[in-house]
Image (cartoon, rainbow, N blue to C red):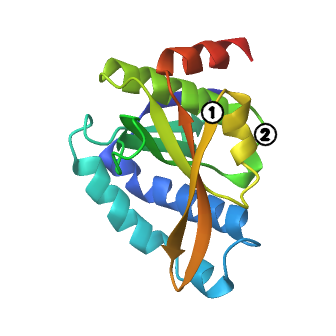
Amino acid sequence: MYTIRKARIEDAQDIAEVHVNSWKATYQNLINEQDLSNTTVEHRQILWETILKLPRKQQPVTVIEEQGEIVGFISGGKERTDRFGYDGEIFAIYLMPSHQGKGLGKRLLKSFAQEMKELGYRSLLIWVLTKNPTHQFYLKYGATKIEEDQTTIGYDTYQETAYGFKDIDILLQKLIQV
């Protein structure tokens, strides 16, 4: 049984653990080892404590739990570049590797899209490392490829791709249908 809810400040450590464990599993063959090993729960916990102290409207964070244990999360807010005509952005969506492929990402995305719509957003953008196979998840729900760019993670530079959902209402319809 899974429960989706708004994140609270006391969730910071659990979110950090999901973030680091999922990030390392996802990127182990895509990012150099030194950059992977420099990512720690302690650093991410400080980041999430800071984020969770912000007004929810500024950066909503939603978690999914299994029997009270956080196994995934999604966060976002105002689109950061103002280059593509999207007003909202997904900053992070992660699930523990043991919970991937069970439809939980879809549930998180649906809950987040609904909240962003309630906050007045009309569209969503997300950046994904180009070599990350999870980009298929976004395409499945109607995202379109917008642009590729370079990003620095640790000491190296990697290619990333922006995907966009031009209309949150259409995204929500697809999340219900699929």
121 or 55: nearer the eye?
121
Residue identified by numbered label 2: 101
Residue drawn at the location 73% of the way across and 53% of the way down:
97
What is the x, y in percent for residue 173?
A: 60, 12
Query: Dot 2 lies on which element?
Result: loop
Q: Nearer the viewer, mark 2 or mark 1?
A: 1
Residue identified by numbered label 1: 143
102 vs 134: above or below:
above
Residue drawn at the location 31% of the way across and 57% of the way down:
49
The reply to whether residue 72 is in sight is yes
Tell me if label 2 and label 1 are in contact, CB under 8 Å: no
What is the x, y in percent for residue 78?
A: 32, 40
Please state which amino acid type lies under the numbered disc 1.
Answer: Ala
Picture quadrant where residue 115 is located:
top left
87 or 104: nearer the eye?
87
26 or 122: nearer the eye?
122
Q: Is residue 119 left or right of residue 25?
A: left
Q: Which quadrant does the C terminus fall into? A: top right
The reply to whether residue 3 is in sight is no
* Nearer-N-terminus badge (2/1): 2
